[in-house]
Amino acid sequence: KLDEVNTVVLDEADEMLNMGFLDSIEEILSHVPEDHKTLLFSATMPADILKIAKHYMRDYEEIVVGTRNEGSENVRHIYYMVNARDKYLALKRVVDNSPGIYAIVFCRTRRDTQEIADNLIKDGYNAEALHGDLSQQQRDIVMKKFRDRVVTILVATDVAARGLDVSDLTHVINYGLPEDTAVYNHRSGRTGRAGKKGVSVAIIHSREKGRLREIERIIGKTFEHLEVPTPEHIIEKQLYNLADRLEKVKVNEEGIAKYLPGISRKLEWLSEEDLIKRVISMEFNRLLDYYKDAPKIDFIDAKPERDRKRKGEKKGPAHERPADDREKDRRTAARGMERVYVNVGKRDGFFAGNLIEALNKLVQGKRVDVGRIDLLPAYTLFDVSKKDARKVVGALTGADFFGKRLHSEIADKDRDYSRLSDKKKKSKSKQ
């Protein structure tokens, strides 16, 4: 019974409304007296949240704690440019190059989050995943292990990491950049707190360079471009870190006194050099074996189109191609999947959460498995299994998204949807 409610408080308002709770919230608000106070709290302030404020509030006031889009003075911003296929290898090298790392790795999807965490665990790192598919009990267990530093690398989605109270993070690692600059600012602000230094790392490929520059412009910070650490550099850094820890370790003279004579007799045949070698090998055999023949990770940048034409070269991988070729790649589905077009994009306030919400609400029967999603300003392309494609197109076509009538179709590899959207936009503006 909500007829006597006088105040409604909605925490994490942007994520609650973007990630599939809109219907539930509207149902609650429909039973609340019209004359009530509404408070919306949000860690970020994208354009979507202002639409929400206008829709649900009268004469609203916006209160900002701190300075909007201001990056922490104690955070160093670094980026590594790599080929998309080398992102995971680069992540491991960043971690290995940071002895004593205590970090959150941010991923865009639940699937990426779980996959990367699983791979890190398999490769011997103290890592765990945190995402929306975990039960509350599983989440509590993961967070206790992370706070106790049993786990030192937490791989998380932005939504799952909201509200985490964790201090002394050394690094925030962006496994790719978020769509919204405010989200990057919120991520990076989790390190460098209480006067301590922190590092925000972005591992990106060439198509994210423009977004990186936009983030720089808005937060007023310049990212340092570093080369991915080489095996030699990583091993040297780790060995010196071990030497430093040995030098500074607190020795319990009284506690070990009775054991020293026996241990000394056991090891007296070893020279000082042999003893040091064995200590190092015990600590670093995995690292030394892994990096023994490891190559340098190089980024092969795109060649200018005029050079390619002059030399008669064939097209290279997707990240090396000109914009027209990359646009065609977006219209190509993964194996076993079908590419679907829908006529709303970021400019309409349409993001991945809105797509998932629409599919869950409109498509009847078993939940649709969604693959790669490409969010463009005026439209969206996404992969679904071939058996679900026609059903998805039929469900989305004719539906309403905040007053805009949706149109969906199986994506045509030869159709330029960006130009189609531009034509529609110009036609509408003339009218």
Image: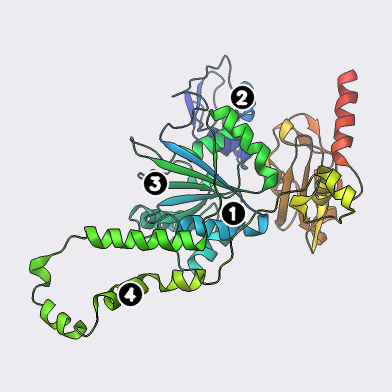
The amino acid type found where label 1 is placed reads Arg
Report, in whole angstroms, how far the alpha carbon at label 3 lies from the one at label 2. Answer: 31 Å
* Precedes in sequence: disc 4 or disc 1: 1
Assess disc 3: are there few (<14), some (14-19) or many (≥20) residues with their C-alpha within 10 Å of its C-alpha.
many
Question: x, y (%) of residue 98?
Answer: 42, 54
Looking at the image, tell me whether mark 1 or mark 2 is earlier in sequence order.
Answer: 2
Please identify the residue farthest to the top as the structure is shown.
59
Q: Which residue is mark 4?
A: 277
Label 3, on which residue? 169
The residue tagged 1 is: 110
Q: CA distance from mark 4 to mark 1?
A: 42 Å
| Residue mark closest to the camera, 3 vs 2 | 3
Spatial separation of the CA atoms under disc 1 and disc 2: 27 Å
In contact (CB < 8 Å): disc 4 and disc 1: no
Separation of residues labelled 3 and 1 (CA atoms): 22 Å
In this rendering, would 358 be left or right of 79?
right
Q: Amino acid at mark 3?
A: Leu
Q: Residues within 10 Å of mark 1 (few under 14, many from 20)?
A: some
Q: Residue at x 27, y 76 (%)?
A: 275
Residue 238, image x and y in percent? 39, 61
Query: In front here: 6 or 355?
Result: 355
Circle 2: residue type: Leu
Sequence-wise, the earlier of marks 3 and 1 is 1
- 2 vs 4, front mark: 4
SS for dot 2: helix
How much space separates mark 3 and mark 4, taking CA atoms? Answer: 32 Å
Q: CA distance from mark 2 to mark 4?
A: 62 Å
Residue at the spot x=38%, y=43% of the render? 165
Regarding mark 3 in the picture, which secondary structure is present there?
loop
